Image: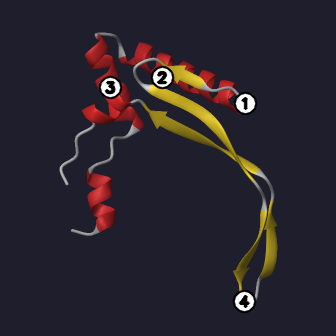
Amino acid sequence: MSTSKTLDANRVSKREFVQRFARRGGISVFAAQTAYNAMIDELLDLVSQGNTVTLTNFGKFYPQNHKGHRVQFGKDEGTGEVTDYTVLKFSATREVNRRVKTND
């Protein structure tokens, strides 16, 4: 099996995640979808404002700034410039990392 197919087989879609979340919490899929959307929106709003969001016993989400740099896209396309940018980073707690099990 190719790596791409293996990765797809191990992925959980947003829809499936929300359904599992609803079932585990004993709530409706609608309530779970509403909670999921609110959590993601709030997390992104806070991090985009430069905040670190720490979820106790889970981990922290934080912005990581990167400096811009020159890039070369190809022989015929010349060079370009990537401006400064920020990415969302996540750091799990030790306890969370211990709970993660893989079938490698």
Q: Mark 2 sits on what residue?
A: 36
Residue 51 quadrant: top right
**Whole-percent x, y for residue 61 in the image:** 56, 31
Sequence-first tag of 3 and 2: 3
Question: In front here: 30 or 3?
Answer: 3
Viewer-side label of 3, 2 = 2
Alpha-carbon distance for marks 3 and 2? 11 Å
**Residue at left offset 22%, top offset 40%:** 101
The amino acid marked with disc number 4 is Lys
Q: Quadrant of the C terminus?
A: bottom left
Q: Mark 3 sits on what residue?
A: 19
Q: Quadrant of the N terminus?
A: bottom left
Viewer-side label of 1, 2 = 1
Question: In front here: 6 or 87?
Answer: 87
Q: Residues within 10 Å of mark 4 (few under 14, many from 20)?
A: few
Q: Mark 4 sits on what residue?
A: 75
As displayed, is residue 98 above or below residue 57?
Answer: below
**Residue at left offset 41%, top offset 17%:** 32
Q: Residues within 10 Å of mark 2 (few under 14, many from 20)?
A: some
Farthest top residue?
26
Mark 4 in CB contact with mark 2 (< 8 angstroms):
no
The amino acid marked with disc number 2 is Tyr
Alpha-carbon distance for marks 1 and 2? 22 Å
The amino acid marked with disc number 1 is Gly
Mark 1 in CB contact with mark 2 (< 8 angstroms):
no
Mark 3 in CB contact with mark 4 (< 8 angstroms):
no
Mark 3 in CB contact with mark 2 (< 8 angstroms):
no
Tell me the SS state at disc 4.
loop
Q: Mark 1 sits on what residue?
A: 50
